[in-house]
Image (cartoon, rainbow, N blue to C red):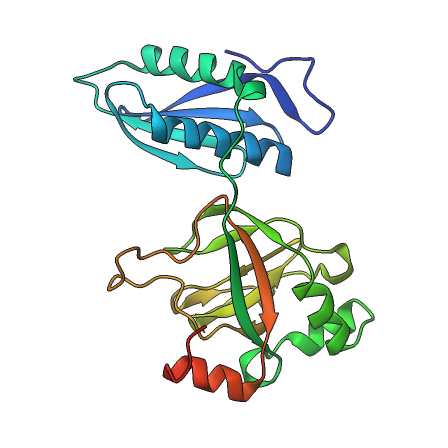
Amino acid sequence: MTRSKDAHPQGILVEPVFRSVGDRGLLMELSETINEVTNQRIRALCDSLQICAPKGVVEVIPTYRSLIVTYDPVRTTPELIRRYLSALASMLEETSGSKPNVVEIPVCYGGELGRDLSFVAEHNGLSPKEVIQIHSEPLYPVYMLGFTPGFPYLGGLSEKIHTPRLATPRTKVAAGSVGIANNQTGIYPIESPGGWQLIGRCPIRLFDLDRKHPFLIQAGDLLRFIPISEAEYAALEAGEVKP
């Protein structure tokens, strides 16, 4: 299947594009660009597949503007999966996704926990206090998880605080670090290398294998950052109070 010449101005495709992903996967692409409308359609598709997936489907993986369906080739074929997904997509106008879960993430901004806050402020001609206010105002849609387990890629970052990523990534970024890279913001769930501008840190674990549900945040959730003090951060990190 090829891209339609009548694509939506936002890059949304009139008909989905399908691509093989190895010998056990099928990718369904709904848009040429990243946008909230497409991501909502992806979420609606995933919700429908959770309720009634065709025989042989093993896993459904949502991304910014597409989804990947892995399947058992003994039980089904990519053509059958493609037909099912095409029919499901055509009914999306009649299908509403589930009500998104709102997750509040406490963040201590600046200081040793957010060493790049001053740079983000200077780059955008703002004060650190204004950056914190702008960053913590929106409800951010969680487009997808990736990079490391539980890393949320969020939409909706204000243009007022867009800031380029570091020219040279750091070899170690602490778990819970909240960063900005160009037009995106996100949270490092585990210690890892990273090149985002760090503006604060969250004391809550986003990814924990000891929990019944290891991922605190899921694709499709809405996320709100809640500014907290250093004392509140220390208390939450020590488990003295519950978030």
Residue at position x 46%, y 17% from top? 88
Q: Is residue 94 visible?
A: yes
Q: Quadrant of the C terminus?
A: bottom left
Residue at position x 40%, y 58% from top? 216
- In which quadrant of the rendered view does residue 199 lie? bottom right
Q: Is 113 placed above or below 47 here?
A: below
Left or right, 169 with respect to 138, comes to left
Percent x, y for residue 153? 53, 51
Q: Is residue 168 visible?
A: no
Q: Nearer the viewer, residue 97 or 190?
A: 97
Percent x, y for residue 186? 54, 59
Percent x, y for residue 240? 39, 85
Q: Residue furthest left?
A: 74
- In which quadrant of the rendered view does residue 224 lie? bottom right
Q: Residue furthest bottom?
A: 231
Percent x, y for residue 219? 46, 45
Residue at position x 67%, y 27% from top? 11
Left or right, 123 with respect to 36, comes to right
Left or right, 208 with respect to 98, comes to left
Residue at position x 59%, y 16% from top? 3
